[in-house]
Amino acid sequence: MRFMTTSDKPEHAAETTDAAAHTGVAAQDWATAAADPQYRAAVVDLLGALAYGELAAFERLAEDAKLAPTLEDKAELAKMASAEFHHFERLRDRLTEIGEEPTAAMEPFVAALDGFHKQTAPSDWLEGLVKAYVGDSIASDFYREVAARLDADTRSLVLAVLDDTGHAGFAVERVRAAIDADPRVGGRLALWARRLMGEALSQSQRVVAERDALSMMLVGGVADGFDLAEVGRMFSRITEAHTKRMAALGLAA
């Protein structure tokens, strides 16, 4: 899951956040909400997952820059990598601020995230762009949905680090140009994007299932958790946003 932040915001994200902003935990600040130890544990997990995702994003974008066909592209990716590292620093500093050790908070998510990136390693520059735009955006959408249920202080931080680092417009422009130049590229990239969709959703569900605090946040009583029907609607919204991103790239979902 992103656990990465190079995403353009889906239509529903702002609506979802606004709807929850004045009820329950979402109306509280961190100091008040964190009095519940279960809620605190869930937020530490969430921040740890995001922090490692940002660190992995920085590392991957720096690596992808080596595949860039031009100096301009290389510089663009380097700028995005820098933005991801800044997001990591904000999350790391927040964990320290609330009395948590950042490395310990990130550690539970290292294997799952590294596994995801190993299974979805791009074979070329274009696959790397599609992964950053499509694959990472799915995880970002998931985190935005969760953010709507968080206390005001945590919600503000999470939404800030999920801001698009500029990859969305850059990826769309480069991928569409490649398809215009050789339409056969579109079929290959569409298959790749479908695989990313499946892997990203599976990973999201797997990580949540393995962490009791996060599970309780989503489907339990912590932080005004989703009921099962809402979980279904959440994944429908994520899928709908994915379809729109595919269309923006000129690919069939």
Image (tube, rainbow, N blue to C red):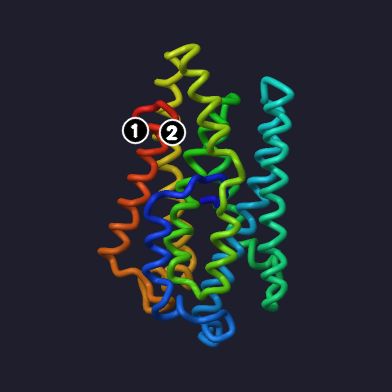
- Measured from the top left, where is residue 149 in percent x and y? 43, 71
Q: Which residue is situated farthest in the left direction here?
A: 229
Secondary structure category for the residue under label 1? loop
- Measured from the top left, where is residue 186 in percent x and y? 43, 21
Report, in whole angstroms, how far the alpha carbon at label 2 lies from the one at label 1: 8 Å
- Measured from the top left, where is residue 124 in percent x and y? 59, 24
Secondary structure category for the residue under label 2? helix
Residue 119 visible from this viewpoint: no
Q: Is residue 11 positioned above or below 35 on the image?
A: above
Q: Residues within 10 Å of mark 2 (few under 14, many from 20)?
A: many
Q: Which numbered dot is residue 120?
A: none
Instruction: Check disc 2 and report the residue beneath it.
Output: 193
Horizontal relation, residue 116 to residue 78: left or right: left
Horizontal relation, residue 87 to residue 25: left or right: right
Horizontal relation, residue 75 to residue 235: left or right: right
Image quadrant where residue 48 sits: bottom right
Three-letter code for the amino acid on which mark 1 is drawn: Ala
Counting residues from the start of the chain, the first of labels 2 and 1 encountered is: 2
Image quadrant where residue 104 sits: bottom right
Horizontal relation, residue 65 to residue 34: left or right: right
Comparing 174 with 46, the one in front is 174
Instruction: Check disc 1 and report the residue beneath it.
Output: 253
Comparing 156 with 207, the one in front is 156
Comparing 29 with 64, the one in front is 29
- Measured from the top left, where is residue 141 in percent x and y? 45, 52
Which residue appears at 34% of the width and 57% of the height? 234
Position of the C terminus, as image quadrant, is top left
Three-letter code for the amino acid on which mark 2 is drawn: Ala
The answer to the question of whether label 2 and label 1 lie on touching residues, with beta carbons closer than 8 A, is: yes
